[in-house]
Image (cartoon, rainbow, N blue to C red):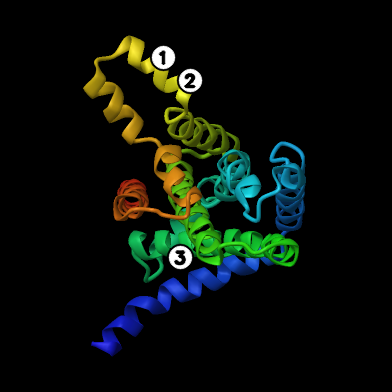
Amino acid sequence: MLAKIKIYLAPITALYHKECNDFLNSAATAVFLIFFLLACGILPFTVGQFFFRNQSDLQSLFIPLPWIFILFIPALTMRTWAEERRLGTLELLLTLPITPCQASLAKLAACATLLLVALALTLPLWITITLLGSPDHGALAVGYLGAILLALAQISIGIFLSALVRSQTAAFILTVATIATLTVIGSTNVAQILESIFPDYLQRAITTMSMSDHYKGFLRGSSSLGDVVYFVSLCSAALLLTVLAVKRTSEDV
């Protein structure tokens, strides 16, 4: 059993290392991290009013984080498959002993690793509020868990949309539009608009699909199993669609 697992993971690990090396050797990665940290460092102290709230929590970071992701995650995922198609390396990749599922998992893991590194670099904020007060560390951990699940779902969507197009710009625009839509449909103003247009049951169904609606539980530090299942299901569905899109491409090769 272990031998079969090792055989299955071998091509995933190889492609994962290749993708990570591409990130490390790219100047765009440094730009990504710098601007991400600037956004996470500035917004909590300006829009989030970190010092004026007089509370020992990271709500000032977690609340604007989905809006930060809307720009940065598409920039992270837009090249995953679109660049392979543009350069013609997708055909070469598909001739190697690696399945579309394994390749998709490797690319997802590489993007997730870079995003986790970016989130880890915000941990000094946790240290800061610990020095300034007595925060609920369990609630802070749940907040970071919500941010990770949100990021994984959005990365999965971005990778799927990148597999559909040949242009990085098109992949970026499609991903921004998709995750922005899944974010704003959970806002109060949009919910009121939907309520005036659709029946209550349909309005609730649309709102339930919102990422922000399920992310709110993590902000309170008391997420439900349903919220976790939502993000895991969204990530799994996007990964499945990615595999189908890559398989379709492989059949055309």
Q: Give the residue number, with chain letter if any, for mark 3.
A: 106
Image check: 93 left or right of 5?
right
Q: Can residue 252 be seen here? A: no
Q: Quadrant of the N terminus?
A: bottom left
Identify which residue is drawn at 56% across, 62% down.
Answer: 136
Q: Does residue 12 sit above or below 234 in this rendering?
A: below
Q: x, y percentage for residue 229?
A: 30, 53
Nearer to me, 115 or 167: 115
Q: Residues within 10 Å of mark 3 (few under 14, many from 20)?
A: many
Mark 3 vs 1, N-terminal side: 3
Distance, label 2 to label 1, CA atoms, is 6 Å
Q: x, y percentage for residue 19?
A: 57, 65
The amino acid sitting under disc 1 is Ile
Work out which residue is located at the far top of the displayed protein and give it: 196
Image check: 209 left or right of 211?
left
Q: Pointer 2 and pointer 1: residues touching (CB < 8 Å)?
A: yes
Q: Nearer the viewer, mark 3 or mark 2?
A: 2
Q: Give the residue number, with chain letter if any, for mark 2.
A: 189
Q: Nearer the viewer, mark 3 or mark 1?
A: 1
Identify which residue is drawn at 35% across, 50% down.
Answer: 227
Q: Pointer 3 and pointer 1: residues touching (CB < 8 Å)?
A: no
Q: Give the residue number, with chain letter if any, for mark 1.
A: 193
Nearer to me, 141 or 114: 141
Identify which residue is drawn at 29% across, 89% down.
Answer: 3
Q: Secondary structure at mark 1?
A: helix
Q: x, y percentage for residue 205?
A: 27, 29
The amino acid sitting under disc 2 is Asn
